[in-house]
Image (cartoon, rainbow, N blue to C red):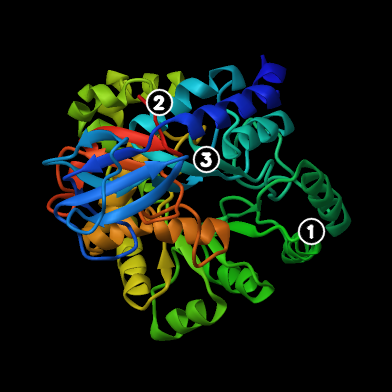
Amino acid sequence: MLSMLRVPYPFLLAALAASLKAQPPTSIVGAKLIDGAGGAPVENSVVIIENGRIRAAGPRAQVTIPANSVRVDGAGKVIIPGLIDAHCHYAAPLGDIRKYYSVLLRWGVTTIRNAGTDSPDAVATMHDFRDGKLPGPRVYTSGYGFSHPQGAPGVSARINRPATPEEARTAVRALAAQKVDFIKIWVEGGGGRTPKIAPEIRAAIVNEAGKHKIPIVAHVTALEDLRQLGDLGVTDMLHTPGDATATPELIAYAKSKGLSFTPTLANMESGFRYYENPELLKNPMILGAFYPSGWARVTDAALREKQLATDREQRKERIRAAYRFIKAMSDAGVRVVTGSDTGAELSPVPFGAATHREIEMLVEAGLTPFAAIKAATLDAARMLTRSANPNYGSVRAGKVADLVILDLDPTADIRNLHRVHKVMRAGQWTQ
């Protein structure tokens, strides 16, 4: 099964490319266009897709509709770019991967970043998704991440736990041979709960990764660790430091180092969200979005009763603190992007649904719906590609045609993101 997933079938890919070129363009006519790049919405737009890319996008009065195009009536609909989740995991058998990734597409998630738990076999499969050899979202992967020998996270995946800097360098070189897209470091241990990976080992990882031109992503929850990694040149931070507020000095530091934050808000509430709101589980789109173990947990009546009997106020205050942190950072121009921890092994963070919830929580934190959508599209694409002008993440001419058609306007109510009508990935409808 796994070898079949990895086979690129060059002759089939060539046939698919030829088929795409032979297809007439698609014209989506009359929808409201939110391009993801921060431009003013276009109330009556035309978006033309050809050969997997956006040929034109703009006001209907300014875009010529090709006579041979397949017209899609967009009246009353809203177009946004495909959504991006920059903090994901995959912890199920690889034989089930298409099933779960089809759920992501159902929610309009067309790009993800897997952070730290992909085996070498999984890395090869994720590359096939990234490169369009398998139908699904575009996937970036780190392979196995790094942590202290007794540190977080407590997962079944055999991640790298080096005891010395040289062991760390050897592991980085092995990941470079797998051609991973980035490297993940867990720096955990807030409150003394678990030991942290040593600073000298972190430095060795960053240094060796730099030799191979592989970027680093760090799970950071304490200010001292954020600063140490920032001083080493690490720019991508997962979570927010729980012991810090966004002071002017810290904001200036973040801007000077080019930091970005993927706050992973949806995971912070995953321990109580579905117990407090069991009606959410009745949403047809949620079916198949949990691993079986996660579904068993969120539907366990006894566990629900136990969790609801606990005092959740401390966890909710931690979320409010994260809201204050990311709002201040965002207002100051520090990049904040979406990443939910979807697919995490130990938390009920459902595929796709958690990405939507992450965007909703950015709005709850005080970002405008436009800013939250940009965080989940163009800004996330810029971070993932290390480019100010990535070839996806916005609905503009020349970009890869990853887009979502919605039945209702998410800028009027961000929860309207749930009203997914149709999804396109690289010019092909996914349903």
Instruction: Determine whether 369 is above or below 112 in the image.
Output: below
Q: Nearer the viewer, mark 1 or mark 3?
A: 3
Instruction: Find residue 212 and name its label.
Output: 1
Q: Earlier in the sequence, mark 1 or mark 3?
A: 3
Q: Nearer the viewer, mark 2 or mark 1?
A: 1
Residue in the image at 65% along x and 76% along y: 231
Q: CA distance from mark 1 to mark 3?
A: 22 Å
Badge 3 marks a residue whose secondary structure is: strand
Q: Earlier in the sequence, mark 2 or mark 1?
A: 1
Is label 2 in contact with label 1 (beta carbons under 8 Å)?
Answer: no
Badge 1 marks a residue whose secondary structure is: loop
Q: Is residue 63 left or right of residue 16?
A: left
Instruction: Determine whether 59 is above or below 17 in the image.
Output: below
**Amino acid under disc 1:** His
Q: Give 227 or 367, whichever is nearer the viewer.
A: 367
Q: Is residue 310 visible?
A: no
Return the x and y of residue 42 as percentages of the image width and height: 19, 58
Report the residue marked by disc 3: 138
Instruction: Find residue 234 and name its label.
Output: none
Q: Earlier in the sequence, mark 2 or mark 3?
A: 3
Instruction: Find residue 290 and name its label.
Output: 2
Return the x and y of residue 17 as percentages of the image width and height: 57, 32
Q: Give 391 or 64, whichever is nearer the viewer.
A: 64
Instruction: Determine whether 183 is above or below 379 in the image.
Output: above
Q: Give 254 or 394, whichever is nearer the viewer.
A: 394
Image quarter (top left, top right, bottom left or bottom right) of the C terminus: top left
Q: Is residue 59 visible?
A: yes
Circle 3 packing at 10 Å, graded few (<14), some (14-19), many (20+), is many
Q: How many marks?
A: 3
